[in-house]
């Protein structure tokens, strides 16, 4: 089980891997450039500014952002041994990341007690 302190690093790597896998390296760099120029958001800041990342992705990719977010969520949840399942309408990318971060934190606390 990964420690809570590693969550940001795992999230950042998952975002980078997904963007490179979906769009290729050159296009991923264009997306990062857009995020940085329009929202002053670097790859390193994405785990701390998830809402800004989601808005920037939606601004750049329009409705395609939801597909990318889904792929990121599936991979990130899988990295922690969870299956990603949509819990209904009205839950955002930020909500799912927050939920996973809480699960990871809770599991880390449990694991440290044993």
Image (tube, rainbow, N blue to C red):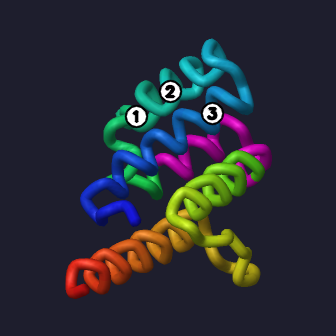
Q: Is residue 67 above or below residue 32?
A: below
Picture quarter with the C terminus: bottom left
Give the mark, 1 or 2, whose residue is nearer the N terminus. 2
Does 78 lie within the magenta span? no
Q: Marks 3 and 1, how far apart in space? A: 11 Å
Q: Residue at x 50, y 27 (%)?
A: 32
The residue where tag 2 is placed is 32
Does 57 lie within the magenta span? yes
Range of magenta residues: 53-66
| Towards the viewer: 104 or 68 | 104
On screen, residue 76 versus residue 58, left or right, reads: left
Position of residue 88 measured from the top left corner of the image (x, y, whole percent): 75, 83
Q: Residue at x 58, y 63 (%)?
A: 77
Position of residue 24 measured from the top left corner of the image (x, y, whole percent): 69, 20
In the rendered structure, are the residues bearing label 1 and label 2 in contact, judged by CB atoms less than 8 Å apart? yes
Q: Is residue 41 above or below residue 85?
A: above
In the rendered structure, are the residues bearing label 2 and label 3 in contact, judged by CB atoms less than 8 Å apart? yes
Give the mark, 3 or 1, whose residue is nearer the N terminus. 3
Residue furthest front in the image: 114
Secondary element type, mark 3: helix
In the image, which disc is placed on residue 43? Answer: 1
The residue where tag 3 is placed is 19
Give the mark, 2 or 3, whose residue is nearer the N terminus. 3
């Amino acid at each position: 089980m990964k420690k809570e302190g590693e969550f940001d690093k795992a999230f950042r790597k998952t975002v980078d891997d997904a963007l490179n896998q979906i769009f290729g390296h050159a296009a991923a760099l264009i997306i990062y450039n857009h995020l940085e120029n329009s929202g002053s958001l670097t790859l390193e800041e994405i785990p701390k500014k998830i809402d800004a990342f989601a808005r920037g992705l939606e601004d750049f990719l329009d409705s395609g952002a939801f597909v990318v977010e889904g792929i990121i969520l599936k991979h990130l949840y899988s990295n922690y041994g969870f299956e990603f399942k949509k819990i209904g309408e009205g839950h955002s990318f930020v909500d799912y990341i927050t939920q996973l971060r809480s699960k990871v934190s809770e599991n880390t606390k449990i694991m440290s007690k044993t």
